Image (tube, rainbow, N blue to C red):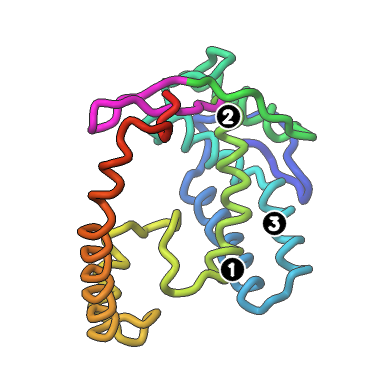
Amino acid sequence: MQKSSANGTKGQTDWNAINWRQVNRRVRNLRQRIFRASRENDLAKVRSLQKLMLRSYSNTLRSVRQVTQENKGKYTAGVDGIVTTTVAERNELTDSLMSAQPWRAAPARGVYIPKASGKLRPLGIPTIRDRALQARVKDALEPFWEARFEPCSYGFRPGSGCHVPSREFTTSPHLCGGGSGFSMLISKGRSIVSTINSCWMPSVGSLQGNSFDNG
């Protein structure tokens, strides 16, 4: 592991000598400091801590480990055709990221992946290097916004999913209008939508063959 300084690192990375418990603790502590500063609305401190996170050697190590060893797409290359699978390659990637200023992202590799319906959807695959840089930035931004989100905000948040709001809305009357009142509102909404569909859909069917679909 490199010797770290206040603004970066000195020396070369030795992947096999890294103390991952210490790395994770440093990143976790810095994330918690950003979270607390955001809660206190101390934006100057938030910005200072975020810059520290972006320069953090521990954050860079963890980001490289995440995209090259932990993520499902670790063997999927971007437009450069490069995957990082060996210790030497991880050492090189880490050292290059610590000196990467400014960052200019490479184009994403476009592929099509199948959906459950049998159709295909487009997917952009960044390079391994860009994914590591994105992971590093994520650790600087995520704790700031987590401190500011509403309790009933669920989209694209860690540890959350579509099953959480469906449970919360029916069991927590105090949360975003949840509880029995919210359930009644949903029931009424379904009834209205059903009425609209029965009145409107036949007229839509009669328009078949007109120029709605240019394909």
Instruction: Provide the residue span drawn in magenta.
Output: 111-126
* Helix, strand or loop under label 3: helix
Residue at mark 3 to residue at mark 2: CA–CA distance: 26 Å
Is residue 88 at all visible to an observer of this figure?
A: no
- Please name the residue shown 56% across and 62% down the image: 143
State which tag comes first along the sequence, 1 or 3: 1
- Please name the residue shown 30% across and 35% down the image: 208
State which tag comes first along the sequence, 3 or 2: 2
Q: Position of residue 47 (x, y in %)?
A: 75, 61
Q: Position of residue 101 (x, y in %)?
A: 79, 34
**Quadrant showing the N terminus:** top right
For disc 2, the marked residue is: 14
State which tag comes first along the sequence, 1 or 2: 2
* Helix, strand or loop under label 2: loop
Q: Nearer the viewer, mark 1 or mark 2?
A: 1
Residue 134 vertical placement versus 164 (above, below) = above
**Which of the two residues, 63 or 81, is positioned nearer the viewer here?**
81
The part of the image, by quadrant, that contains residue 79 is top right
Q: Nearer the viewer, mark 3 or mark 2?
A: 3
Residue 97 vertical placement versus 169 (above, below) = above
**Which of the two residues, 119 or 213, is positioned nearer the viewer here?**
213
- Please name the residue shown 73% across and 74% down the image: 42
Q: Position of residue 109 (x, y in %)?
A: 53, 20
For disc 3, the marked residue is: 50
Residue 143 highlighted magenta (yes or no):
no
Q: Label 2 is placed on what type of residue?
A: Asp
Residue 113 highlighted magenta (yes or no):
yes
